[in-house]
Image: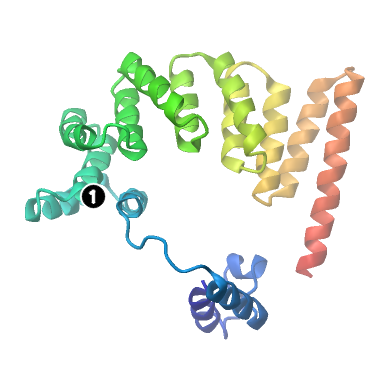
Amino acid sequence: MPTMFERLGRQYRFDAKPPEFLLTHPVTESRIADTRNRAEQAKPGGKEDSLRYQLIRARVQLQYEDTSGLAAKRFQAQLDENPKNDVARYGLAIAQIKASQFKQARDNLAPLLAKAPNDITYNLAQIQLDIDNNRLPDAQQRTDRLLTQYPGNYPLNQIRVDLLLKQNRTADAEKALDALLKSRPDDPDVWYQVAETRGLSGNIIGLHQARAEYFALVGDFQQAIQQLDFAKRRAGNNFPLSSRIDARQRELIEQERLVKGMMS
């Protein structure tokens, strides 16, 4: 981390306007010194270059490919070079899911799941494959089994919501999201999903409230405040609800004022 900060500081030292990340997270000498001090105090040990790290790295790489076909070719070449390369096989399967090559993806995930039937990463890929391939009972069965083993796993609970929405079970999806919010109240991804789900169930006031929380968490206070305006209009003569919305709006206005004060 300190090395990353030093590189960022050198790269943008003479720029008139550095990127937004550096405006909100200034790279000061004290911050570099603090991160270096923390790193030096970290306990030795741990794992370097673990299989889980490589699997997630392959998944992240796919997010930045222009097309899934380019990634598939790269992973296929790695697999041709070493047929025992599980990371390449997993990456190829994810690329094939994105390209709707469901049979090929299933064939590549099968040996991985046979070797590690309870691995959360492989199972999540299989659930996503079954959802995309409209094999919803298979996806549901696998999700239920895994939730008994990993009840607090965030990606698993998130994909469970996707599965419930795919089955048009919006009420169950809302309950699942309410549970997620208890453990991750400051996660904008969860609030985004809450907004979408409330919209599907016809809860328009709740939709605007959830959008407001999402925009506040990503720093767009103007949009957040506007969404609460929309919610208040919908609330009409419901005085208790209007009062709660109004109080939250005042909190966000104050948060925006404090943030602007810190930036000036």
Expressed as whole percent of the image width and height from the top left, the position of residue 161 reads: 50, 25
Q: Is residue 227 left or right of residue 103?
A: right
Secondary structure at badge 1 equals: helix
Expressed as whole percent of the image width and height from the top left, the position of residue 134 reads: 31, 19
The residue drawn where x is 64% and y is 49% is: 218
In this rendered view, identify the residue nearer to me: 172 or 154.
154
Q: How many marks?
A: 1
Q: Is residue 155 left or right of residue 204?
A: left
Colouring: rainbow
In this rendered view, identify the residue nearer to me: 202 or 85.
85
Q: Quadrant of the C terminus?
A: bottom right
The residue drawn where x is 48% and y is 14% is: 168
Expressed as whole percent of the image width and height from the top left, the position of residue 171 reads: 59, 14
In this rendered view, identify the residue nearer to me: 166 or 179.
179
- Amino acid carrying label 1: it is Val
Q: Residues within 10 Å of mark 1 (few under 14, many from 20)?
A: many
User: Badge 1 is on which residue?
Assistant: 87
Q: Is residue 246 left or right of residue 155?
A: right
The residue drawn where x is 45% and y is 24% is: 148
The residue drawn where x is 35% and y is 63% is: 48
Quadrant of the rendered structure where residue 203 is?
top right
Quadrant of the rendered structure where residue 47 is?
bottom left
Q: Is residue 218 visible?
A: yes
Residue 198, placed above or below residue 93? above
Residue 39, placed above or below residue 218? below
Residue 121, placed above or below residue 11? above
Expressed as whole percent of the image width and height from the top left, the position of residue 248 reads: 83, 38
Q: Is residue 199 visible?
A: no
